[in-house]
Every structure is written in C-alpha cells, then in structure tokens.
Image (cartoon, rainbow, N blue to C red):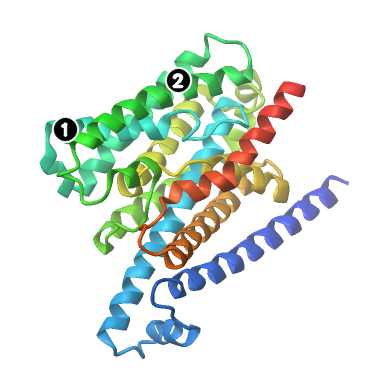
Amino acid sequence: MALEIRRHLMRRYVLSITSLTVLLIVVFFLSISVGVVGLGLKEVVGYFLGATYDPLLKSILELRITRTLASALTGASLAVAGVLIQGVTRNPLAEPYILGISSTALSVTSLVLMVKPSLINSRTEIMLYSFLGALLGFTFTLMLSRLGSSGLSLVLAGVAVTSISSGISHILLYLLQSVLRMPYVYLLMGSVSPVLKSDLPILTSTSVLCILASLLIAKPLNAYVYGDEYSKQLGFNPRLTLLTAATIASILTGITVGVVGIVGFVGLASPHICRYLIGSDHRFSLPTSALVGATLVVFSDIVVRTVSVVVRGLGELPLGVITAVIGAPFLAYLVLRRVRE
C-alpha cells in the first residue's frame, strides 16, 4: 500500500513538473512577444536561431528577454522563500511581504543609500544590504509574534513591521528621487522594467544557488514542521534548520527587493497552489513552487505590459499591483478559514 501511494505521488509530481515547465515556456515566449511593438513567433524563434539581423529588432528582443528572465527569477525566488518561511514558522499565512521581510529589506537599503548615494551603481552591495534588512525584518517579526499565542499573531506582527518599514521607505525614497534610476513607486510595488542585462548574472547565480541549497534542507524541514522534538528524534537539529531556512529565505527576498523592489503575495500564492497539486513534502514542493512562482510573475508582467499598450500615456503599472490582485484572495481565504477553525 505504501509503495502504491509513493508511486501515485511520484506520478503526480512528474505530471505537475512537466505541465508547469511547458506552461512556463509558453508564457516565456508570450512575454517576449508582447509589448508596444508586437512580435510574432517567427521573429522570436529567429532571434534564438541567430537569424535576426535587424539591429532594432535585436535590441527589442534583448530587452524583453532580460525583463522576462528577471520576472521568472523573481517569481521562483519569492516562491521558494515563501515555502521556507511557511515551513519554519509552521504557518500557512506566512510569506516575505506579509511578514514585513520585503519592506524591511527596502527600508534598510534606502537608509544606506541615504548615507551613501553612490551605492546606487553597485548592485552587489545593494543586494547585500537588502539581504541584511530582510534578515533583520524576519527576526523582528518572529520576536513580536511570540507575544501572542495564535497563528494570526505572526501575521499581525508582520503587519506592524510592514507598516513601520514602509513608512520609513516612503520618506527615504522620496528624498532619494534624484539618485534613483526609476520612479520610487517601482521600488515600493515592484517592477522589472528598470532591470539591466548586467543585473542578470548575479541575480541568476544567487537565485539558483539558494534554490539548490533549499533542496538540501527539504528533509529536515519536513521534520521541523511537526515540532522540535520530532525533528530531534529523526536526528536533525531544529535550530540549525531554522537558521539555514531563514538565511536562505532572507537572501532570496533580499536579492529580489534589491533588483526589482517589493513584489507581494507571490510567496503566499505559489506554495498553496503547489500543495494543491502535489502535497506538502518539501522535497517536491520547493522545485514545484519555483516553477509556479516563475510562471505567475512572468504572466503578471505580461498583464502589466498589455495594460500599458491598451491605456497609453499613463506609464506602466507596478508589477506588485497585479501580483496583489492574484495573491491577496489567497490571504483572505486563509484568514477566514483560520477564524472559523
């Protein structure tokens, strides 16, 4: 019976991974095609085959590929961060945006830029300070949540941290407008439009390494969810599991905030979609959530550009607006379910 259940789960996992990979490829090519200048599949495929000679067309395609890759990496990073945070907090309502991790990352980065504006040209240092801010926000939220006794205490603590950090970020970014290379609302609500091709190597390498590292703690995290004692009985160190998962989640959140700003609810929606598809085993949910998150953010960016084409003259919507419309209903549903329980 156990062997049959395992085979069934593996079939579901393989089917989900395959379907999500195909879906991600479809939205990837669709994302490259959508924009003010509409491109067909022929032009897109021609570029990848090296058959594109028009310099203007090549420039447009390179910009869109950069943007699409940034969207996919952002989504995958935030989704995996969401899985890790929900695991170590043992709370399905947790995610980087709701717990104030993203907003603290931005406020610390803004504070550093206020002191040293020249850092705006050093993406690596911005990511470093953003990571430190994310780790600080996560720690502070966990400390506040321990004053309460219910799962909602964590969310309320996150709301408090988010409010304080967002207020600080608003003030500092407003004062830093002359230094920033984008409208500051894009940092507060996220946007991949300012991402440069030179940003991709560090974003890609850090995201991929952290996602791979998260897979190494999948088994300890499975045990940690059921309590410290259970984790110890299976030979794992719960404190080390918490520290490792929190660090990886903070790095993933920090690098995305440092490059694209705050994009909310991806870390909430993606893990729940994933659990519906393949269950809660972290060995499977981490890679599956990465694909769900990548697809979700790439699709959201397609919506952003489609709206900017239809409604011209207003500029682009922040990416976080679309992800909030998609992800916020998950939060409302989960909170209502918690209250009823």
Q: Position of residue 270 (x, y in %)?
A: 59, 47
User: Which circle marks residue 114 in the picture?
Assistant: 1
Residue 297 in view (yes/no): yes
The answer to whether mark 1 and mark 2 are in CB contact below 8 A is no
Q: Specify whether 163 is left or right of 113.
A: right
Q: Position of residue 91 (x, y in %)?
A: 61, 27
Q: Residues within 10 Å of mark 1 (few under 14, many from 20)?
A: some
Q: Which residue is under mark 2?
A: 160
Q: Is residue 268 above or below residue 294?
A: above
Q: Which mark is residue 162?
A: none
Q: Nearer the viewer, residue 84 or 134?
A: 134
Q: Position of residue 212 (x, y in %)?
A: 47, 49
Q: Please identify the residue farthest to the top as the structure is shown.
A: 147
Q: Residue furthest right?
A: 1
Residue drawn at 47 percent across, 67 percent down = 310
Position of 309 with respect to 12 (left or right) is left
Give the amino acid at mark 1.
Met
In this picture, is 126 found above or below 191?
above
Expressed as whole percent of the image width and height from the top left, the position of residue 83 reads 56, 39
| Residue displayed at 45% across by 20% down | 160
As helix, strand or loop, the secondary structure at mark 1 comes to helix
Q: Nearer the viewer, residue 305 or 133?
A: 305
Residue at 64% x, 21% y: name it: 227
Q: Is residue 341 visible?
A: no
Label whose residue precedes the other's in the sequence (1 or 2) = 1
**Count of marks overlaid on the render:** 2
Q: CA distance from mark 1 to mark 2?
A: 23 Å
To which quarter of the image does residue 129 belong? top left
State the quadrant of the C terminus.
Answer: top right
The amino acid type found where label 2 is placed reads Ala
Q: Secondary structure at mark 2?
A: helix
Mark 2 neighbour class, 10 Å CA radius: few under 14, some 14 to 19, many 20 or more: some
